[in-house]
Amino acid sequence: QVRLVESGGGLVQAGGSLRLSCAASGRVNSILIVGWYRQAPGKQRELVASITSGGNTNYADSVKGRFTISRDNAKNTVYLQMISLKPEDTGVYYCSANVIESGSNLRNYWGQGTQVTVSS
């Protein structure tokens, strides 16, 4: 079993910054692609950014130039650095990872989410 835990959310004023972390623990052999998603009240969950095991990144148009996804493979942790935050960035942020477990099983996991609130 693998557990993903997000942290780093909070309340910030527009224009501010936050750094989210997604740490994997448990029977982790390797982590493949990881995505950060967010869900605003009344809206569907959307992909914000993703990063492959090789470090290739992809961003939603709405966050390009403001968000940076990165990973520390030694720590099994993926980060989302967010700057110039806007009220429309408000939502619950989740990480999702495709993980190869110690027994060589490939599974997808989700974290419990961390709330980001940007005030105007």
Image (spheres, rainbow, N blue to C red):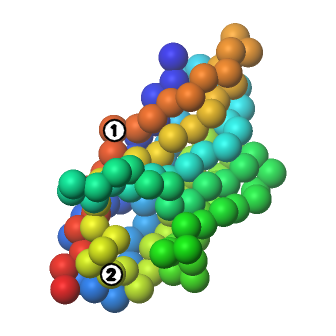
CA separation in Å, label 2 and label 1: 23 Å
Q: Is residue 49 left or right of residue 82?
A: right
47 lies above or below 76: below
Task: Please tell me the numbered disc located at residue 37.
Answer: none
Percent across and percent down for residue 91 are 28, 60
108 lies above or below 59: above
Quadrant occupied by the C terminus: bottom left
Toward the front, the furthest residue is: 43
Using a 10 Å C-alpha cutoff, classify the residue at mark 2 as few (fewer than 14 neighbours), some (14 to 19) or many (20 or more): some
**In the rendered image, which residue does mark 1 sit on?**
112
User: Which kind of residue does numbered mark 2 sit on?
Assistant: Lys
Tell me where residue 46 sits by quadrant: bottom left
Residue drawn at the location 64% of the way across and 30% of the way down: 99
Tell me where residue 103 sits by quadrant: top right
Tell me where residue 43 sits by quadrant: bottom left
Cβ atoms under marks 2 and 1 closer than 8 Å: no
Question: Which mark is nearer the camera, 2 or 1?
Answer: 2
User: Which kind of residue does numbered mark 1 sit on?
Assistant: Gln
Using a 10 Å C-alpha cutoff, classify the residue at mark 1 as few (fewer than 14 neighbours), some (14 to 19) or many (20 or more): some
Q: Is residue 109 left or right of residue 86?
A: right
Dot 2 falls on a residue whose secondary structure is loop
Residue drawn at the location 55% of the way across and 67% of the way down: 60
How many numbered marks appear?
2
Dot 1 falls on a residue whose secondary structure is loop
**In the rendered image, which residue does mark 2 sit on?**
86
Q: Nearer the viewer, residue 32 or 74?
A: 32
Q: Nearer the viewer, residue 103 or 109?
A: 109
Sequence-first disc among 2 and 1: 2
